[in-house]
Image (cartoon, rainbow, N blue to C red):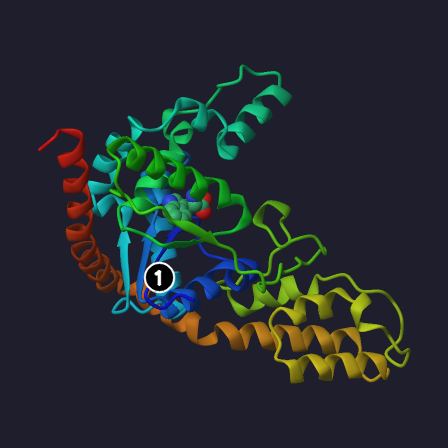
């Protein structure tokens, strides 16, 4: 399905990931990128400045996200891996796209609407604290995508609308000039990716404070795993695994054999809660062991990562320049 296609993945620099981020987004994004004939992956640092105004914090997050993807096996020889701000043509293209972006389309963007709703709930004016970067965010995202003649954008459900906006903007531009100047992308949702429950049973999310961290030390990971609530039934009492949260989390990471072992042990009254928590802990630590070593290596030798990102931008820029020229030729009639 991705043979012969150009796939583009954008990641926000949000710091080190938890188990839910890894299994739900990072792992599938890397796997999918490897299947694509052309894969672009970039760190959306211009998107990030809308919210993060402290350069020290932002820089640290950018570093972390770059090292995380490399640690989990992103191959910079296959994937064109770059920082958005290292490809200035993207922002020039954004400026051209503004002229083809109806303001009403931005008014309808979920990200902006969510902020307005929050303001209303708090009894504040609609646009309180909302900057133009946030308001026009979908146009920059459209430029991210359209610059590289992208066929497919893998996204989570919350980003579908943004890809549709990119399609609409490209469509408006093409319609005006009566030819396909910009390729219209489609989004792709990986249906098989599980939502990983957090230690309280709700979706694992930083905002719920219920995460199993991956890049913390073993003790901290253990603490999170052992905080999953259980009851006081004795080991011998046969239990239905599907009613046990540790088992639900284990599902997202264990092999079928490992999963069966836990399920059989619970049903047969052979495994207690301490046992199954240790099984989950081992599975998490095994999954990230190598990645953590690589992550630490890249963080300590960040100049190597800088070099990779620079090379990525060098590969990305000629493509971006060609798209920019195509657009300028049209809009200025050259
Ligand atoms: N908006 C995306 C997010 O919040 C990040 C992003 C920016 C992106 N530009 C993109 C994703 C282009 C895909 C394609 O996660």
| 279 is higher (above) or lower (below) than 324 | below
What residue sits 15% from the left and 52% below the top?
Answer: 318
Q: Secondary structure at mark 1?
A: helix
Please give left or right for residue 333 compared with residue 134 in the image: left
Question: Residue at position x 47%, y 25% from top?
Answer: 107
**Mark 1 vs ligand 1: CB below 8 Å:** no
Q: Is residue 304 left or right of residue 281?
A: left
Please state which of residues 184 and 195 is positioned toward the viewer in this rendering: 184
Residue 301 appears in the picture as rendered: yes
Residue 150 at what x, y percent from top left? 32, 52
Q: Residue lying furthest front in this view?
A: 178
Q: Position of residue 296 (x, y in %)?
A: 37, 67
Query: What residue is rendered at 91% in x and 78% in y?
Result: 237
Quadrant of the image for the C terminus?
Answer: top left
Residue 310 horizontal side relative to residue 258, left or right:
left
Q: Quadrant of residue 123?
A: top right
Q: Position of residue 257 (x, y in %)?
A: 66, 85
């Amino acid at each position: 399905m991705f043979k012969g296609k150009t796939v583009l993945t954008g990641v926000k620099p949000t710091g080190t990931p938890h188990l839910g981020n890894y299994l739900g987004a990072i792992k599938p994004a890397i796997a999918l990128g490897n299947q694509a004939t052309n894969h672009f992956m970039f760190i959306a640092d211009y998107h990030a400045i809308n919210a993060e105004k402290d350069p020290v914090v932002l820089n640290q997050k950018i570093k972390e996200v770059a090292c995380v993807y490399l640690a989990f096996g992103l191959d910079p020889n296959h994937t064109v891996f770059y920082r958005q701000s290292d490809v200035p043509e993207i922002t020039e293209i954004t400026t051209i796209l503004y002229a083809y972006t109806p303001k009403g389309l931005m008014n309808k963007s979920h990200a902006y609407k969510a902020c307005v709703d929050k303001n209303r709930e708090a009894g504040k004016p609609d646009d309180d604290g909302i900057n133009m970067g946030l308001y026009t965010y979908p146009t920059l995202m459209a430029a991210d995508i359209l610059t590289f003649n992208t066929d497919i954008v893998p996204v989570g459900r919350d980003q579908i609308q943004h890809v549709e906006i990119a399609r609409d903007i490209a469509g408006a531009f093409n319609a005006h000039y009566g030819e396909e100047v910009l390729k219209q992308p489609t989004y792709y949702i990986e249906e098989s990716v599980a939502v990983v429950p957090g230690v309280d049973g709700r979706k694992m999310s930083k905002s719920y404070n219920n995460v199993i961290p991956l890049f913390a030390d073993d003790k901290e990971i253990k603490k999170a795993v052992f905080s999953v609530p259980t009851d006081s039934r004795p080991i011998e009492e046969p239990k239905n695994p599907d009613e046990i949260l540790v088992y639900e989390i284990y599902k997202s990471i264990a092999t079928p054999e490992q999963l069966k072992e836990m399920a059989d042990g619970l049903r047969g009254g052979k495994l207690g809660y301490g046992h199954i928590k240790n099984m989950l802990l081992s599975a998490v630590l095994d999954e990230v062991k190598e990645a953590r070593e690589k992550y630490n290596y890249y963080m300590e030798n960040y100049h190597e990562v800088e070099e990779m990102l620079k090379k990525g931008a060098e590969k990305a820029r000629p493509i971006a320049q060609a798209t920019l020229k195509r657009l300028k030729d049209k809009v200025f009639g050259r």
